Amino acid sequence: MSGMIEFDDAAAKAVEAMYLTPDVVGQRARVLDMLSPKPGERIIDIGVGPGLLAQDLARLVGDTGRVAGLDAAAAMIKMARTRLAALPQAECVEGDACALKFADASFDAAVSTQVYEYVADMPGALSELRRVLRPGGRALVLDTDWRSVVWHSSDEARMARVLACWDGHLADPHLPARLAPLFRRAGFTVARVEIVPMLAAHWQPVSYAAGIMRAIHGYARGNGARYGLSEVEVQEWYDDQLRLIERGEFFFSVNRYAFLATRQDAAGP
C-alpha cells in the first residue's frame, strides 16, 4: 500500500521505545498468559519487531525449545537479533507473513501482535499460519480495531479526519471484527478472545498514547494531503493536544483484541 509506514532504523527505534512503555509491557504479559508457552516448545513470532516478546518466549521455552522471529523489515530484524544474541534457542529471519519459510508442522505455537492489520491477504496469511503449526497447535493473534478509539479533542471533526488518515497506513484498521470467521474458514477453532485496552486517562509522557500521538503526527504530515488534510491542519490538531495536556484534559483509549485459536484437522485436533 502506498501509505504504509517504512520501518527504517529511526522507525524501529520509535517502535522499540513505544514497546518499552508500561502499557505495552502489560500487553506482553497478557499475551504470554494467553499463549502459555511451555519449556521445550517451538514457537514462531510473526512480526518479531524489536524482539521483546521473542526474548520472553525464548526464556520461557528454555534451552530445549526454539523461537523463530520473522519480520519484513530489515531494521527490525537487526534490532531483534541484537536483543536475542545471548539466547541460542532464538533465531530471526526476514520474511513475509504470507510466505513463511518454514516446513509444515514446524511449530507448537505461533504469536503475532500488531501485524495482520498490515496484511492485505488474510486468508493466505492464515493458511500459511495453519500450515506451519502442528495439528492442535495454537495461535495468539492481537490487533487493534481503530473504531474503538476514544480521544478527546477540541475539534472532533478534525480529529476524525486525522484518524481517517491514520487508517490509511493499514491494510485493515478494523481487522479484529472479522478475525474470528477468518480463523474458522482457515481451519482454526477460536478458543478465547480478550480485550487489551491502551488507556491513558491522563497524560503520561512515557506511554503508548504519547508514542502513538507522535507517530500519527508524523504520518499525517507526510500523507494528509491524500485525505484532504493540510500540514497546517495537522499541526493544529497536534497543538490542540498539547494545550489539552497543559490543562490536564488529555484522554485517550483504544482497544486491542487478542484471539487464541487452535489448528483443527479432519481427524481431530
Image (cartoon, rainbow, N blue to C red):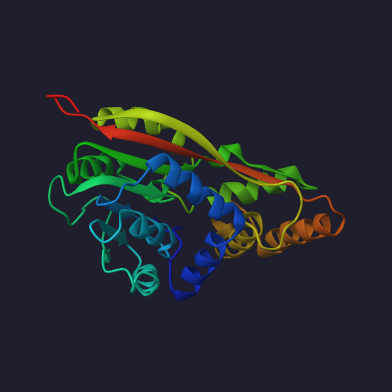
- Name the residue located 42 percent from the left edge and 57 percent from the top edge: 53
As drawn, is 124 to the left or to the right of 255? left
Q: Is residue 215 above or below residue 105?
A: below
- Name the residue located 26 percent from the left edge and 61 percent from the top edge: 63
Q: Nearer the viewer, residue 217 or 26?
A: 26
Say which quadrant the N terminus sits in. bottom left
As drawn, the residue found furthest toward the right would be: 247
- In the rendered image, residue 43, in percent from the top left (x then y), is placed at 28, 51
- Name the residue located 49 percent from the left edge and 34 percent from the top edge: 194
Q: Could one spot residue 47 in this view of the protein?
A: no
As drawn, is 160 to the left or to the right of 189? right
Q: Is residue 83 above or below residue 234?
A: below
- In the rendered image, residue 195, in percent from the top left (x then y), is placed at 53, 36
- In the rendered image, residue 170, in percent from the top left (x then y), is placed at 45, 50
Say which quadrant the C terminus sits in. top left
Circle count: 0
As drawn, the residue found furthest toward the top would be: 267
Q: Is residue 54 above or below residue 193?
A: below
Q: Could one spot residue 154 in this view of the protein?
A: yes
- Name the residue located 76 percent from the left edge and 56 percent from the top edge: 241
- In the rendered image, residue 76, in percent from the top left (x then y), is placed at 39, 68
Q: Quadrant of residue 70?
A: bottom left
